[in-house]
Image: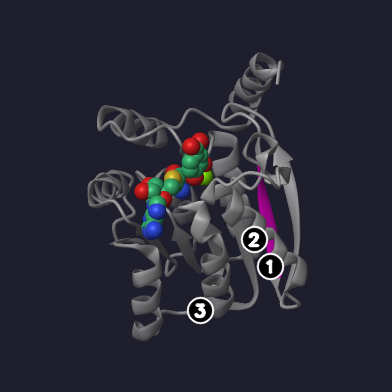
């Protein structure tokens, strides 16, 4: 890909035009970098897309799989009504602690629950606890488990819920059938499930920008 510089510059232009200076989220990114957290948050324009999707949906209860430092969690929380809630799942206890700090700093400590642990375990305990069914589910953790996360998402979704999965393109690697990389295989099996699952209508969109060449899958649960 020879166009990375223009992708980056166009993203900067859109951020400049459409995303007013945001001290809260700037603080989160700074805190994440200072804590040595990898720079793999959704980009600002993508975070705003998540926020807008949650608004369009009128989402009240959101599930996020893959918290990192809480950057996307905060975007999602901002879209919710007073009684809204984000449950966000993170395997790394240190990241979960930083996320909680960031979320408190953003004023969303009552709206966002960071749940530390392996998502496949914490999803099961959420189900047992009888968490509300979710209106929007953002899948953004270990891609090898995407097929399991899609099953859980369908299990925990409201009728009409939106399911969004990050990183389904990975520089085009998604179409490389030879790749033995577990993450790519997980994404491909996830796409196979979308192909064959009658309970969800979906599409996938390629993206370029400050986070390189990647994409989202988006589906609506029947
Ligand atoms: N949604 C975040 C980015 C998430 S990065 C944002 O845009 O700001 C992916 C995260 O998934 C990492 O923090 C990683 O630790 C976490 N993760 C990886 N495997 C996991 C698992 N099995 N269960 C829960 N979280 C997991
Ligand atoms: C990477 C990017 C992501 O958005 C993610 O969720 C996980 C990893 C990456 O670039 O490595
Ligand atoms: Mg991601």
Residue wearing tag 2:
189
- Dot 1, crowdedness within 10 Å: few (<14), some or many (≥20)? some
- Dot 2, crowdedness within 10 Å: few (<14), some or many (≥20)? some
Q: In which quarter of the image is residue 27?
A: top left
Please indicate, yes or no, whether residue 67 appears anywhere in the rendered image: no
Q: Which residue is drawn at 48% across and 27% down?
A: 21
Q: Which residue is drawn at 69% across and 16% down?
A: 6
Answer with left or right where residue 71 lies relative to residue 190.
Answer: left
Of tags 2 and 3, the one toward the viewer is 2
Query: Helix or strand or loop: what does disc 1 sit on?
Result: helix
Rendered view: 59 above or below 5: below
Quarter containing the N terminus? top right
Query: Does ligand 1 reach within 8 Å of label 3's beta carbon?
Result: no
| Stretch of the chain drawn in magenta | 215-220
State if disc 1 and disc 2 touch (CB < 8 Å): yes
Residue wearing tag 1:
193
Query: Helix or strand or loop: what does disc 3 sit on?
Result: loop
Q: Which of 179 and 4 lies nearest the eye of the viewer? A: 179
Q: Which of 204 and 84 lies nearest the eye of the viewer? A: 204
Mark 3 or mark 1, which has the lower sequence index? Answer: 3
Query: What is the number of the mark on residue 133?
Result: 3
Rendered view: 117 above or below 199: above
Quarter containing the C terminus? bottom right
Rendered view: 39 above or below 64: above
Mark 2 or mark 3, which has the lower sequence index? Answer: 3
Q: How far from the left and from the top, in percent, is residue 178?
A: 67, 45
- Dot 3, crowdedness within 10 Å: few (<14), some or many (≥20)? some
């Amino acid at each position: 890909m020879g166009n990375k510089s223009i992708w980056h510059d166009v993203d900067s232009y859109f951020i400049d035009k459409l995303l007013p200076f945001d001290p809260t989220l700037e603080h989160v990114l700074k805190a994440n970098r200072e804590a040595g957290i990898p720079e793999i948050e959704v980009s600002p324009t993508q975070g705003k897309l998540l926020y807008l999707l949650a608004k369009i949906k009128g989402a009240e209860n959101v599930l996020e799989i893959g918290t990192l430092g809480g950057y996307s969690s905060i975007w999602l929380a901002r879209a919710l009504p007073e009684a809204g809630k984000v449950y966000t799942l993170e395997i790394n206890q240190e990241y979960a602690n930083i996320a909680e700090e960031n979320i408190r700093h953003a004023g969303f400590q009552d709206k966002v629950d960071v749940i530390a642990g392996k998502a496949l375990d914490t999803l099961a305990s959420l189900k047992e606890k009888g968490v509300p069914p979710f209106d929007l589910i953002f899948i953004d953790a270990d891609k090898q488990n995407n097929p399991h996360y899609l099953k859980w998402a369908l299990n925990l979704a409201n009728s009409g819920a939106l399911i969004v999965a990050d990183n389904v393109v990975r520089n085009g690697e998604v179409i490389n059938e030879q790749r033995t990389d577990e993450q790519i295989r997980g994404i491909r099996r996830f796409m196979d499930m979308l192909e064959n699952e009658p309970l969800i209508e979906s599409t996938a969109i390629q993206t370029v920008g400050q986070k390189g060449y990647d994409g989202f899958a988006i589906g609506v649960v029947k």
